[in-house]
Amino acid sequence: MKNIFKLLALMSLAFSLVTASENNASIDSSIVKIYTVSKATNYLEPWNSSVQRSSGSGSIISGNRILTNAHVIANETFIEVKKYGDTKRYEAEVLFVSHDTDLALLEVKDKDFFKGTTPLSFGTLPKMQDKVTVYGYPMGGHTISVSTGIVSRIEHNRYVHSGKSFLAIQIDAAINPGNSGGPTISNGKIVGVVMQGISFSQNIGYMVPVDIIQHFLKDVEDGKHDGFPKLGIMTDKIENPSLKEYYHLAEEEGGILVVDIVHNSILKEVLQKEDIITSIDGHKIESDGTVEFRPNQYTHFKYFIDVHQYGDKVSLEVLRRGEKLSLNVTLPKTSSKEKSTYSQLEYDKMPTYFMLGGYVFSPITQNLLNSSGNPVLSLRYAATKFPKKEKQELVVLLKVLASSHTRGDYGIGMWYIAKVNGKEFKDFKEFYGLVMNTKEKFVVLEDEDGAKVVINKKEALDAESGLLKRYSIKANKSDDL
């Protein structure tokens, strides 16, 4: 009898090993290496760009699609993919991209690519200390790499690619360049996508959790990407006892204080400055601005906004001058072009600029600020503010190229322009129109303090072709102008 039990146990173990092997082989066949050729833009010389090559990882999911990171294919000019166990590269294209959450979907022109593969399915948000396995093609070799670890932290964190904050999962599995975009697997299903690590750390990596991925996939079901709802409000914590008393908030109560509301906020019709939002969809907001999304686990209050799509309804509990209010809000569809601050990161496009006789102008973007070593602290601070209805972009005199008529102005760079010939402007295109359409002899640029740069328009235009040739500049303005 004992021998029979031993035999059954051995048979069961053998069956488990075979099943595990088959599952691993199925997962391996769905892991993809991505080769990207991209344009490296130069925001300090916006007419210039170079070509760079990089690689990343991805996974095959339903609908003959490949899931990866946005930063793997950002600014792409050509993409190829290769599946595990194959030496042939196939041309791919971007289907949808969410730069905010660092996610992208690719499609492959030749459907033969998907022969012999099994699309991976999605699991649920893992728990602390759950074991996870990272698949991908990191540096150090050419074949697939598999590493294991555990979930060590779940909370809102900054996504490096966009600078935006969303729920993120910290894991201790080894993550290296090239792992980006690869799936994190638990119980045979995708629970996240690897996105970033921390340099000089001991195995600290982050992945985009499955909840964010599912939101992205549901969002694009209608054929377009709307993104996560942006509230368009500036908030502050209410932890100080005197501050709570001032706003008629009981000591045991929590909430977030509405400090400012952007002009195009989806909440501008229902909220007022100095409102205190105490709960979202019945979930209490703590004094430190967090919410309990799982028993004894807290993260940023935005979590219960991020679970929604545009078009959903949200309920808010608000304290307004000591009076409790229940508000219902529908999150309307909004344009992806709306900005939450003056300085936004740009992707998949060349910088916007134009030149007038050696004077080079550009709108402020986060890309430009990141590229510039010029401190200009007042400008950098202004770039963090909410755009106003009458002011959508900040414009700078980026640099001045040397010529006979620009003498004395060579040293000017990153100089903020508030007015053109005494007129204010809404955005860069309006600024461009004011400069190019003026009938005045001089284009007079003025900053907030009244300091001026004066350009003789005729002399500048006459010198333009020579300057373009001298500095090997293809055009005096970007294609979008």
Image: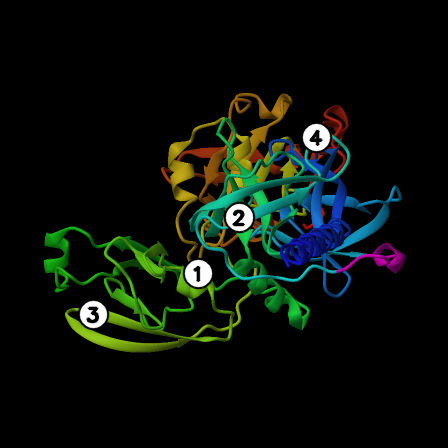
Q: Residue at x 62, y 64 (%)?
A: 217
Upstream in sequence: badge 2 or badge 4: 2
Residue 342 in percent (x, y) is at 47, 49
Q: Which residue is mark 4?
A: 463
Residue 197, by quadrant, is top right
The magenta-colored residue range is 109-118
Q: Three-letter amino acid code at disc 3?
A: Arg
Q: Dots 2 and 4: beta carbons under 8 Å?
A: no
Query: Which label sits in the foreground, 1 or 2?
Result: 2
Q: Residue at x 47, y 27 (%)?
A: 374
Residue located 40% across and 53% down the image: 386
Q: Of tags 4 and 3, which is closer to the observer?
A: 3
Q: Amino acid at mark 1?
A: Lys
- The kind of residue tagged 4 is Ala
Kindly report the distance in space between the C-alpha atoms of the residues bearing marks 4 and 3.
Answer: 61 Å
What is the number of the mark on residue 320?
A: 3
Can residue 327 be seen here? yes
Query: Can you identify the residue that label 2 sits on?
Result: 131
Of the image marks 1 and 2, the number of the one nearer the N terminus: 2
Image quadrant of residue 134? top right
